[in-house]
Structures are given as structure tokens and as C-alpha cells.
Image: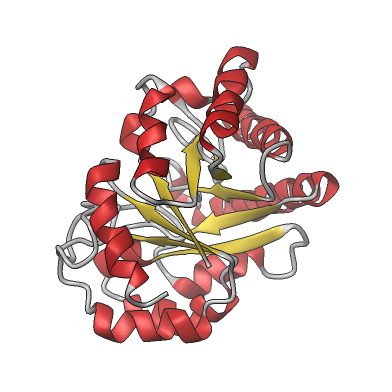
């Protein structure tokens, strides 16, 4: 099992900080492909690739999500979202076999037509799954924290979006599930099927991205389930910086 590090808060920083990920002992970096790390720009793609050549880190990719909505009922926005996700998946295939996607959300208008938003989200998953299959990656849909109007705060809903869709898989984010109050249910339904795993801590209300053991998650209960039931090959520690991430890495090494 390989352990990666990711920090979406650092997307505007020079990529030189990534060297610390290797220095503290992580196996890889999950790129938050936004800000200075967008893969659709040749100059940033080259900079990202150079980081991996210099550090020897393995790689996974988290697709951009700022201002994008695969559940939008505003079709130009929906098309642009699918286009950006598609380009990211195609570019990421040169680096990795795993791409993480955030789900969509209801807008003030689509709150009155949730069925159309759900159907558009499913159509987006089908389109993106086709791209993922074509380029040889798995596009993995992530569960969301306790944020109003977002899809995938319920494990059955998350599973429903990818069910029967070739090229699509599931990400279980342990920290996110802790904020929605149904972590046990997510572990029961999603963990055995998850292709990818995000892990961090919080106090059950907000998505704090604390080091493991710094919040309220009962790791003595969760970690044995992860060790036994998770069939993926990577665990991604999502943190605020590599120094804090090292605490999580040391914590995980006791179990894995």
C-alpha cells in the first residue's frame, strides 16, 4: 500500500514545496490540478512533470473543481465542466491511472428541479467514464463534506452515479464522511468498493483537514476496517502542509 500526500490549499504556490513530500517519506503526490497545476496548460504540465522526474514521487490527479458543476442545468456551464474534466483526464493519463472528480451541486434554480440536476450529473459520469476508458484511467467520484446542496453526501447516491458506468470508480473520503454523520454507513457501502481513499481528521462539523488523531474520528475502529476491506493501492493523506502530513504518515505506518 502506497501513501500519497495532497494539499489543495497550495495550488498557487511554486511547485518547489513538493520536494518536502518526498523528504518526509511519502510515496507520491496527488496533484490538485488547479491554479498553478492545471494540466491543460503546457507550461504548468511541464512544471508538474519535472517535479516527478526530480523527486521520484508517484502521482495521482485530482481534477479541477473551482466554478465547475457536472450537475448544472445551465447547459453551457455543464458542457464546459465536462470539457475541462475531459481534458484533465486525457492529460492525467500521461502521468497516472487514477483521476479524482468532485461531484456537482444544486443551484438556486435546480433546487426546484433536482431530477434534472441528477440526470445531468449521471450523463456527465457516463461521458467522463467513456473518456477514462479510452485513455486507460479510472475516473473516481468523491463523497462530499457537510456542504448544503452538494451531491454525494449519501453513500447510496454516490454509488448510484457510477453504478453501471464503465471507466468510473469511487473515492471514499473518510474526513468528509465524518462531517456528514454517516461515516459508518460510508464504510459499510463504499469502502469495500472504493478504488481510491482520502484520509484526514476533523471534529465532525467542518472539513478541517487535520492530521490523523487530531480530531474526533475513532481511528481504532476505522483503521482495522480499512486494512481489511479497502482493495485500492493508494491512500492519500489530505493535509495543510507536509509537516503536518508527516504526523499522519507516522500514524498510518503503525497500521499499514
Horizontal and vertical percent for residue 26?
Answer: 42, 51
| Residue in view at x 50 percent, y 77 percent | 191
Q: Is residue 103 above or below residue 217?
A: above
12 to the left or right of 90: left
- Image quadrant holding the C terminus, namely bottom left
Q: Is residue 119 above or below residue 187?
A: above
Q: Is residue 250 above or below residue 91?
A: below
Query: Do we see residue 200 in this rendering?
Result: no
Q: How is the image coloured?
A: secondary structure
Q: Quadrant of residue 16?
A: top left
Horizontal and vertical percent for residue 197?
Answer: 48, 63
Horizontal and vertical percent for residue 72?
Answer: 54, 40
Kindly give the residue lying farthest to the top in the view shown: 43
Horizontal and vertical percent for residue 239?
Answer: 29, 48
How many numbered marks, from 0 up? 0
Task: Please state which of residues 223 and 216 is positioned toward the viewer in this rendering.
Answer: 223
Task: Please state which of residues 78 and 196 is positioned toward the viewer in this rendering.
Answer: 196
| Residue in view at x 64 percent, y 34 percent | 88
| Residue in view at x 51 percent, y 39 percent | 69
Q: Is residue 212 above or below residue 46?
A: below
Kindly give the residue lying farthest to the right in the view shown: 134
Q: Quadrant of residue 59?
A: top right
Task: Please state which of residues 46 and 89 is positioned toward the viewer in this rendering.
Answer: 46
Query: Do we see residue 100 in this rendering?
Result: yes
Amino acid at each position: 500500500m502506497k501513501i500519497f500526500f495532497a494539499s489543495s490549499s497550495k495550488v498557487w504556490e511554486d511547485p518547489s514545496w513538493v520536494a518536502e513530500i518526498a523528504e518526509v517519506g511519502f510515496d507520491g503526490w496527488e496533484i490538485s490540478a488547479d491554479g498553478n497545476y492545471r494540466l491543460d496548460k503546457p507550461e504548468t504540465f511541464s512544471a508538474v512533470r519535472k517535479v516527478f522526474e526530480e523527486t521520484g514521487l508517484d502521482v495521482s490527479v485530482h481534477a479541477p473543481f473551482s466554478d465547475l458543476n457536472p450537475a448544472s442545468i445551465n447547459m453551457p456551464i455543464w458542457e464546459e465542466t465536462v470539457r475541462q474534466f475531459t481534458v484533465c483526464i486525457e492529460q492525467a493519463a500521461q502521468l497516472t491511472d487514477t483521476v479524482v472528480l468532485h461531484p456537482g451541486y444544486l443551484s438556486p434554480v435546480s433546487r426546484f428541479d433536482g431530477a434534472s440536476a441528477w440526470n445531468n450529473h449521471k450523463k456527465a459520469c457516463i461521458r467522463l467514464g467513456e473518456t477514462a476508458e479510452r485513455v486507460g484511467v479510472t475516473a473516481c467520484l468523491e463523497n462530499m463534506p457537510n456542504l448544503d446542496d452538494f451531491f454525494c453526501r449519501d453513500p447510496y447516491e454516490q454509488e448510484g452515479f457510477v453504478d453501471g458506468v464503465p471507466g468510473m470508480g469511487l473515492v471514499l473520503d473518510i474526513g468528509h464522511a465524518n462531517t456528514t454523520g454517516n461515516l459508518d454507513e460510508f464504510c459499510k457501502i463504499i469502502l469495500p468498493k472504493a478504488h481510491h481513499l482520502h484520509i484526514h481528521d476533523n471534529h465532525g462539523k467542518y472539513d478541517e483537514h487535520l492530521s490523523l488523531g487530531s480530531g474526533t474520528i475513532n481511528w481504532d475502529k476505522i483503521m482495522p476496517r480499512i486494512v481489511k476491506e479497502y482493495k485500492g493501492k493508494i491512500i492519500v493523506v489530505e493535509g495543510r502542509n507536509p509537516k503536518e502530513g508527516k504526523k499522519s504518515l507516522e500514524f498510518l505506518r503503525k497500521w499499514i
